[in-house]
Image: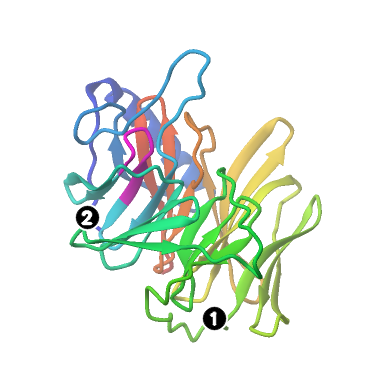
Amino acid sequence: MDRFFRSSAASTMILPLLVLFIIFCGSVFGQVAELVCHLPWGDEAGQIGLINQPEVERCGPLSFCADGSGIFILDSVHQKVVLVEKNEVRTVAENMNGWAICGDGAGGVFIQEGERIAAFDAQGKKGSHRLARSAGKSLKLVEGYGNEIFINSEGYLCARTVSQMVYKAEAPRVKKPAQNNKLPAAEFIIKRLDRNVVRLIGFDSEGKDIISILIQLDGTTAGAVLFKGADDAGNLYVEVERIAGTKVGLQVHRYSIQGKRLAVFDMENRYFTTVYKKTEVTPDGSVYQMLTMPDGVRILRFGGVD
């Protein structure tokens, strides 16, 4: 992916210190974060909307995704989706009061608006999908951290709720089934056995546990724990909030299907605005983070699988 950097004049002095901080933290954990792009706050082209008023919760972008050669960002204030690609920022969807987004791997994007999911292909053609109800029951959709949409290994569009329930769209496949011989076909959930005992469980089509991985908390207490998907090498990824005293850290762990922790990506968790989706894993094993700060939005990338 071609990387680029955009910044306002106000952020010029902040950037060098931030980069040094990121490199230091990355080096401690054996990983160096790469700054993919920076978009300042504002209402002009190439900027991201921000609501920052007294006695009002600050609002900025809620979700993002890394897809193909670019980054899609859900600009919730301007109610649009922008694509950051090479040295360009362009709008790909407007009038979208969305919660979550994901890419289709071919330049298109899906945007969740409650039970409805809008679809835009690379040419801008619009379609629509609706999430299915299970056994006639109503959907329990709540906006918040952990709300994501994604395409599962079978090629179906799905939504994962704040409570980590997964709903499939009523539409047929939107992508060919993934051919990953290194990872058995399974549906994954996070199972919290105790406050500090959390496992990633993989079920086969008959509901049998075929994978069970203990999430390593390193002596801390678990906050939110989210399954983030798999890479082409068959590794599994989990986003973990680690609580130590009054501090809440953010990490993404990479595990083998045998349960060995292969890598830990330690990330900044002091967000300037509320974000529903903080990280994304791509097929090459790269881990992306959307971080909101006083001077704008940064997308960071942590290294893929060698």
Q: Residue at x 63, y 53 (%)?
A: 140
Q: Which mark is residue 79?
A: none
Q: Say which element carries label 1.
A: loop
Q: Residue at x 60, y 78 (%)?
A: 186
User: Which one is closest to the eye, mark 2 or mark 1?
Assistant: 1
Circle 1 sits on which residue? 183
Residue 171: percent from left, percent from top: 43, 72
Name the image quarter holding the C terminus: bottom left
Magenta range: 72-80
Q: Residues within 10 Å of mark 2 (few under 14, many from 20)?
A: few
Circle 2 sits on which residue? 2
Residue 289: percent from left, percent from top: 44, 47
On screen, residue 264 versus residue 137, left or right, reads left
Residue 146: percent from left, percent from top: 57, 49
Q: Is residue 274 above or below residue 90?
A: above
Q: Farthest residue in the right direction?
A: 194
Q: Say which element carries label 2.
A: loop
Q: Residue at x 51, y 44 (%)?
A: 276
Magenta span contains residue 75: yes
Q: Nearer the viewer, residue 239 or 97?
A: 97
Residue 55: percent from left, percent from top: 53, 14
The span from disc 2 to disc 1 (Cα, nearest Å) is 30 Å
